[in-house]
Image (cartoon, rainbow, N blue to C red):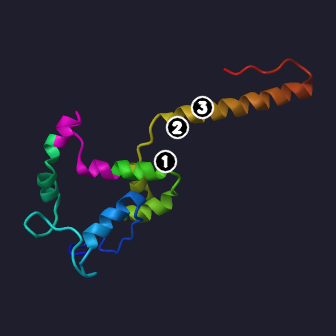
Amino acid sequence: MTKPIKSRKERRVPIVEPLRPVLKRLSEGKQPEDSLLVGPKGGYLTTATVRDATDWDSIVAGLGLPDLTRHGLRHTGATWMADAGIPLHVLQDILGHASMETTRGYLHPDDRHLASAAEQANAFLSAAGQRKQARRGGPSARTI
């Protein structure tokens, strides 16, 4: 680490399998204290050098997502991890947030979870209503 993060604390992050070969290639021949990534001229890697080296503006324009930011990808990654079932307190550590509320603000679950929640609630209520009617001996309950 050559530049401290905002919290000035050490941060450990999990490495997902697709990145392992890339990280292995990038670390070949390097000492543990060497920078893993450097800017195009050998200096520090900054958001500006990443933008320029990747031609970010052209890429997102070509995708039809001109408002997509590199920081937006951080939100996307956090959301994917939450959707995969990673507990919120673990995401908080990964993202380096002091507050759980900050971590929650990073998550943008899609609407499929809302539809799934409604289906689960309907199934539960339908089953509960049917059990109640069966105990009374009346007709089965109908769902909304």
In the rendered view, would you say 111 is above or below 53? Answer: above
First along the sequence among labels 3 and 1 = 1
First along the sequence among labels 2 and 1 = 1
Pinpoint residue 61: horizontal percent, then vertical percent: 17, 37
Depth order, front residue of 137/101: 137
- Is residue 71 found inside the magenta-colored segment of the image? yes
Mark drawn on residue 24: none
* Residue highlighted by disc 2: 113
Q: Nearer the viewer, mark 3 or mark 1?
A: 1
Q: Are marks 3 and 2 in contact (CB under 8 Å)?
A: no
* Residue highlighted by disc 3: 118
- Is residue 64 found inside the magenta-colored segment of the image? yes
In the figure, is residue 90 to the left or right of 143?
A: left
Q: Amino acid at mark 1?
A: Asp
The residue located at (37%, 52%) in the rendering is 77
* Residue highlighted by disc 1: 83
Using a 10 Å C-alpha cutoff, classify the residue at mark 2 as few (fewer than 14 neighbours), some (14 to 19) or many (20 or more): few
Q: Amino acid at mark 2?
A: His
Q: Quadrant of residue 60 in the image?
A: top left
Q: Are marks 2 and 1 in contact (CB under 8 Å)?
A: yes
Q: Quadrant of residue 10 in the image?
A: bottom left
In the rendered view, would you say 28 is above or below 16? Answer: below
Residue 42 seen by the camera: yes
Inter-mark Cα distance, 2 to 1: 9 Å
For the record, the magenta segment spans 59-74
In the rendered view, would you say 97 is above or below 113? Answer: below
Report helix, strand or loop for mark 2: helix
